[in-house]
Image: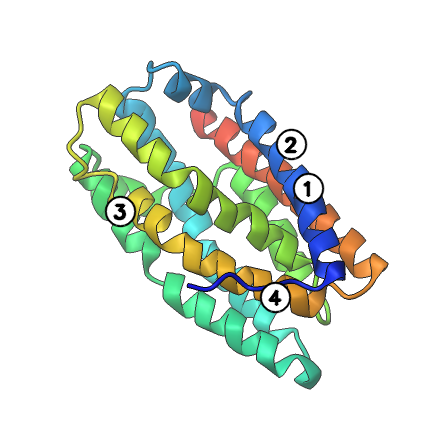
């Protein structure tokens, strides 16, 4: 896919988001679950616990993205179309995650009935609140963090998990799918940044929402071990 050429204002926004991403990577590195993965001490039980707590965030993702699309007015009809298409593409991703959980040794009823952890509650509440505001331009920042995780980390995490748990790829399909497909999602996100980041205030809002999303995402991973 041809890379989208950004306007100067959008390039400035992208630079700000890159700084947020590097900060997010450092935060991830302090999460005990991810530290064990990086050190090769990650167990299959760790992986099942990760999937168990990830499922609710994946399910709620299509909800806040759809709410975000509906909150844009007619002048942003092109934006609504892109975001609705994105929500449609990810609507059933949780089913693949469930299948990975079962393949890794978990019980389907366990993952389907597990409640949201504290971090997921906070993340979902924040994103739904922002998505309900008129013309929620700032949620581009949230998409940057969540889609970026799939693009930049999913394949390497899947490889590490298979290596440390003796897997053959049969229970890391969800991660690999996102690692292989989120490049296309990021190209669409660049176009949204170009369309929506047109003023210093919009840049500030997008950056702030990206920072909040990053911190709450890490909280979600931290709380995975408390459930």
Q: Which residue is mark 1?
A: 211
Residue 192: mark in rendering: 4
Q: Residue at x 36, y 33 (%)?
A: 156
Mark 4: secondary structure: helix
Q: Which residue is mark 3?
A: 98
* Location of residue 202 with respect to 19 vertically, above or below: below
| Label 4 crowd bin: few (<14), some (14–19), many (20+), radius 10 Å | some
Residue 50: mark in rendering: none
Q: Which residue is mark 2?
A: 23
Q: Give the percent coordinates (x, y) of residue 123.
A: 58, 45
Residue 132 showing in the rendered view:
no
In whole angstroms, how far apart are the C-alphas of marks 4 and 1? 18 Å
Q: Is residue 97 left or right of residue 107?
A: right
Mark 1: secondary structure: helix
Residue 199 showing in the rendered view:
yes
Q: Residue at x 67, y 85 (%)?
A: 74
| Label 2 crowd bin: few (<14), some (14–19), many (20+), radius 10 Å | some
In whole angstroms, how far apart are the C-alphas of marks 2 and 3? 30 Å
* Residues at discs 4 and 1 in contact (Cβ within 8 Å): no
Precedes in sequence: disc 4 or disc 1: 4
């Amino acid at each position: 896919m041809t890379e989208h050429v950004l306007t100067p204002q959008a390039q400035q926004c992208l630079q700000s988001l890159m700084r947020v991403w590097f900060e997010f990577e450092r935060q991830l590195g302090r999460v005990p679950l991810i530290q064990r993965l990086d050190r090769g001490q990650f167990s299959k039980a760790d992986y099942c616990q990760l999937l168990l707590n990830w499922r609710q965030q994946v399910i709620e993702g299509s909800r806040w993205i759809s709410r975000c699309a509906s909150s844009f007015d007619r002048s942003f009809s092109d934006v609504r179309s892109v975001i609705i298409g994105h929500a449609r593409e990810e609507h059933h991703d949780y089913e693949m995650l469930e299948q990975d959980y079962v393949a890794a040794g978990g019980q389907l009823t366990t993952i389907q009935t597990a409640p949201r952890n504290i971090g997921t509650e906070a993340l979902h509440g924040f994103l739904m609140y922002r998505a309900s505001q008129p013309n929620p331009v700032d949620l581009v920042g949230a998409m940057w963090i969540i889609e970026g995780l799939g693009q930049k980390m999913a394949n390497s995490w899947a490889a590490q998990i298979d290596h440390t748990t003796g897997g053959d790829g049969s229970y890391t399909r969800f991660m690999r799918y996102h690692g292989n497909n989120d490049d296309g999602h990021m190209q669409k996100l660049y176009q949204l940044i170009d369309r929506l980041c047109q003023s210093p205030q919009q840049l500030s809002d997008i950056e702030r929402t990206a920072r909040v999303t990053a911190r709450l995402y890490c909280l979600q991973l931290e709380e995975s071990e408390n459930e």
